[in-house]
Structure formats: C-alpha cells, structure tokens
Image (tube, rainbow, N blue to C red):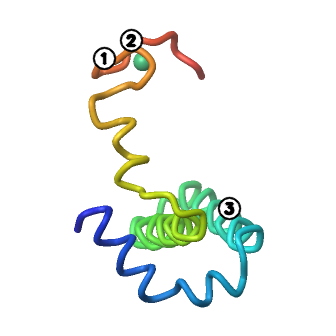
Amino acid sequence: MEIAELQAVLRRTYVERDARRGRDATFRWMTEEVGELARAIRTGDRENLVHEFGDVLAWLTSLANLTDVDLEEAAARYASGCPRCGASPCVCEFRP
Ligand SMILES: [Zn+2]
C-alpha cells in the first residue's frame, strides 16, 4: 500500500470524526498510542508490535489530514537518504 493511498483511506474513514475531535485532541491520542508502542517494544511481542505500529501510523495520518499535510510530500524528505548529509547510510555524527 502506498502512503498516499493509506492517507486517502483514513481521510474517507475518519476525517469527520477527526475534525470533530480537533487537532489538539488528535495529537494527544497519537501520543497515547506512541506510549502503547513503547510498551510493545519492551514486551517484544511481535503481533502486539505490529498492532501498535499500525495505530501510531493511523493517528499520525489522521493528524496529517487535519493539518493538510501530504504524507508523500513529508516522506520525500527522506527519499534520497539522510536529509542532512545526503548519504545512505547516513554519515552524520552519531546521536545516541
Ligand atoms: Zn546524515
């Protein structure tokens, strides 16, 4: 599935609810899902991990829809490798 296709499906599916909830509340829901992803990473359960990645991606996409951000355009920043050094793999100073 293409990023643009996912964004279109989620727009069709949730945009009215997302708009009713608003940007701030949608952002808060996304951060809750990021917390659930953090827990899934710690437990290491693969099925749960895939589930939580999907939820974070969906909430991120809802937020993009609410802020009129095209995720294809956003992803393009990384399409040619590291946006800072331009290399792939990145040769920037490592940040632990
Ligand atoms: Zn780099």
Label annotation for residue 91: 2
Determine the image quadrant of residue 9: bottom left
* Distance between the alpha carbons at the discs numbered 2 and 1: 6 Å
Q: Quadrant of ligand 1?
A: top left
Determine whether the beta carbon of the residue marked 2 sits less than 8 angstroms from the nearest atom of ligand 1: yes
Residue sitting at the far front: 68
**First-in-chain label (3 vs 1):** 3
Is 42 placed left or right of 49 in the picture?
right
Q: CB of residue at label 1: within 8 Å of ligand 1?
A: yes
User: Horizontal and vertical percent for residue 19?
Assistant: 65, 82
Sequence order check, earlier mark of 3 and 2: 3
**Foreground disc of the pair 3, 2:** 2
Q: Quadrant of the N terminus?
A: bottom left
Rendering coords of residue 87 (x, y %):
30, 17
Label 2 Cα neighbours within 10 Å, binned few <14 / some 14-19 / many ≥20: few
Q: How many C-alpha atoms fall within 10 Å of the one at disc 3: few (<14), some, or many (≥20)?
A: some
Can you identify the residue that label 3 sits on?
A: 35
Q: Amino acid at mark 3?
A: Gly
Residue 17 percent location from the top left of the image: 62, 89
- What is the spatial separation of the Cα atoms under label 3 and label 1, in whole angstroms? 31 Å
Give the side of residue 76 with respect to residue 39, left or right: left
The secondary structure type at the circle numbered 3 is: helix
Along the line of sight, the residue nearer the viewer: 7 or 69 = 69
Callout 1 amino acid: Ala
The residue lying at 41 percent from left, 25 percent from top is 83
- State if disc 1 and disc 2 touch (CB < 8 Å): yes
Residue named by callout 1: 87
Vertical placement of 82 versus 38: above or below? above
Taking the spot 70% from the left edge, 68% from the top edge, the residue there is 32
Q: Secondary structure at mark 1?
A: loop
**Residue 15 % position (x, y):** 53, 83
**Residue drawn 40% across and 65% down?**
46
